[in-house]
Image (tube, helix red, strand yellow):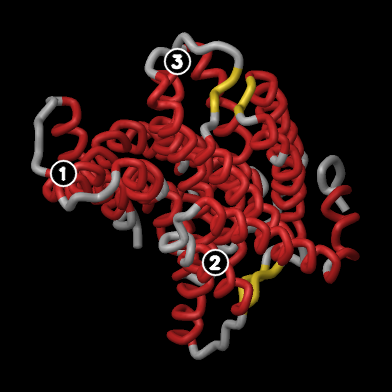
Amino acid sequence: MGQRWWWKIGLAVLLALPAMVVRSGGIHLQPLLAMGTYGGAVVASAFILSWAAEAAQEDISASLATAILALIAILPEYAIDLYFAFTAGHNPDHARYAAANMTGSNRLLLGLGWPLILGLLMFWGWRKGRKVTGVNLKPSRRVELGYLGLASLYALSIPLRGGIHWVDGVILIGIYAAYGWRLSKEERSEPDLEGVAEHLGELPQRQRRVALTILFLWSAFVVVMVSKPFADALVDGGRVLGMDEFLLVQWVAPLSTEAPEFLVAALLALRGDEDTALGTLLSSKVNQWTLLVGSLPLAYLAGGGHGSLPLDARQVEEFWLTSAQAIMGFAMLSKLSLKRWEALALLGLFAIQFPLTHPATRMILAYLYFALAAGLLVVHRSELPGQVRALWSRE
């Protein structure tokens, strides 16, 4: 193929350029046109991220490559949430938006993202003449699961106190730092690459590292630049349709900020890479549940707030629901697989949240999550010691 594969990277870069020109020029577009322009940039950056993350496995472990990929893909969520948290320091009304966006994006990851991966893998299997009954993870994913479980247990204390204190921020960011340190100790295995990622991986080591660094930085730059206008376009479109502003912030905006990681994971699933596909969303969940949540009270303090980022009654309920879902997700993946019935349960429990808006019914739903999680943890109790050991050592 010579150098012909480079045209795919060039095309992805070109697709993002209109959004960059519009953004840097301060040009105002109608919501639908803006959605298409900025959405195209998100799709293009997702392709570049997936190629770079796969090729990076030539130099680092698959888990660490996935974590870097997830961190870049989740940058839009950081941009939106930290903006709300910072402005809440001098505009208290924005405090509920910061928590709403964070809880909405977290529940989207598990409730919609994980079932989506299984659905796409089933489609891939159908095309290849293979029967796919679930998503299987490699043993190395116990690291992500272990830190997800640790962060989820700590997060239970936050709704009990009715706010996210700066001390919570320090502890949660510390958990993320420990997670990153642990991933850096993982051994690299020989990756099975194809397409553009394969050609990137075949470059001489110095050229490959330079190329991948440029691709990662370009993708991060695009994602950060287009995240806010893309979210604004979606919210403006929803407002025109008469949607509730709180729901727009909690669900419509996260759809845009989660788009990069969803697209990257979807591309990987359509190639049959089940471990990296689900692993990307799992790593994103760890990122959001540690680094993102931990950053909110610090941004709030930087914006002029005092003490802790407050959670009103509705947000306390939302936090309980999000925490319960996270623990159930941990319990489901504790045996390193996600079966069809589990994916359907996640999707079903996520879908019924929309008509069940009364606080009492939503707390009942949280209790249901907790009950299912408890049952699964009992069934998979033999897997738990391995999850705990994965926090600090390789097995």
Q: Earlier in the sequence, mark 2 or mark 1?
A: 1
Residue 1 in picture, x, y percent from top left: 35, 63
**In the image, what residue type sits under mark 1?**
Ala
| Label 2 with label 1: CB-CB less than 8 Å | no
Q: CA distance from mark 2 to mark 3?
A: 34 Å
Residue 52 in picture, x, y percent from top left: 47, 47
- Left or right position of 202 against 328: left
Question: Of the numbered discs in the image, which one, if any, rests on residue 89?
Answer: 3
At horizontal 66% and vertical 53% (from top left) the residue drawn is 324
Q: Which residue is mark 2?
A: 349
Q: CA distance from mark 2 to mark 1?
A: 32 Å
Q: CA distance from mark 1 to mark 3?
A: 30 Å
- Left or right position of 375 against 246: right
Q: Is residue 212 visible?
A: no
At horizontal 74% and vertical 48% (from top left) the residue drawn is 149
| Helix, strand or loop for disc 2 | helix
